[in-house]
Image: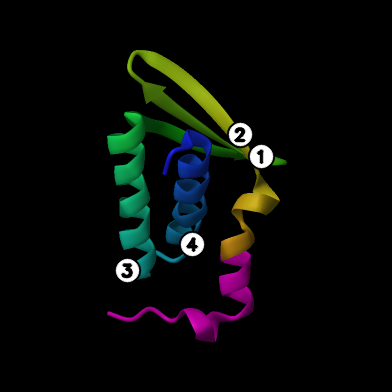
């Protein structure tokens, strides 16, 4: 994934799902996959995530520099919203 913004977006979207569905092993595996992309491809260490209407804010470290990226809540929550609308399609398989 070449774009840092895309990698952060993908990671945050699945992180929100993980937070809402702590027993969802597929979501946790996917979150770990995107975290590896952030670390390996972009040398990013996530510091914090906060939700302040109308945005999620991700603070992260690249080298010695702290940065902050914001994403609209409605854009990030779209996957979780879809899962909640059709839970039978997104059952946890262990």
* Residue denoted by label 2: 70
N-term-proximal mark, 4 vs 1: 4
Q: Is mark 1 on a helix, strand or loop?
A: strand
Callout in the foreground (3, 4): 3
Residue contact between numbered discs 2 and 1, judged by CB atoms under 8 Å = yes
- Left or right, 89 with respect to 91, comes to right
Crowd around label 1: few <14 · some 14–19 · many ≥20 (10 Å): some
Separation (CA) of disc 3 from disc 2? 27 Å
The structure residue drawn at horizontal position 33% and vertical position 43%, both measured from the top left corner, is: 37
Is residue 90 placed above or below 11 in the rendered structure? below
Residue contact between numbered discs 4 and 2, judged by CB atoms under 8 Å = no
Callout in the foreground (2, 1): 2
N-term-proximal mark, 3 vs 2: 3
* Residue denoted by label 3: 25
* Residue denoted by label 1: 55
Whether residue 54 is visible, yes or no, is yes
* Residue denoted by label 4: 20
Separation (CA) of disc 3 from disc 4? 12 Å
Is residue 32 placed above or below 62 in the rendered structure? below
Q: Is mark 3 on a helix, strand or loop?
A: helix
Crowd around label 2: few <14 · some 14–19 · many ≥20 (10 Å): some
Whether residue 52 is visible, yes or no, is no
Residue extent of the magenta highlight: 80-94
Is residue 80 placed above or below 92 in the rendered structure? above
Corner quadrant of residue 61:
top left
Q: Is mark 4 on a helix, strand or loop?
A: helix
- Whether residue 84 is in magenta: the answer is yes
Instruction: Farthest residue to the front: give it.
Output: 2
N-term-proximal mark, 2 vs 1: 1
- Left or right, 23 with respect to 49, comes to left
Separation (CA) of disc 3 from disc 1? 27 Å
């Amino acid at each position: 994934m070449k774009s840092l913004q895309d990698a952060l977006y993908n990671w945050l979207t699945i992180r929100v799902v993980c937070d809402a569905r702590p027993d969802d092993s597929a979501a946790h595996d996917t979150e770990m996959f995107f975290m590896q992309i952030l670390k390996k491809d972009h040398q990013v260490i996530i510091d914090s995530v906060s939700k302040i209407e109308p945005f999620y804010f991700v603070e992260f470290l690249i080298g010695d520099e702290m940065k902050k990226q914001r994403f609209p809540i409605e854009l990030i929550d779209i996957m979780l919203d879809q899962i909640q609308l059709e839970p039978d399609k997104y059952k946890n398989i262990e």
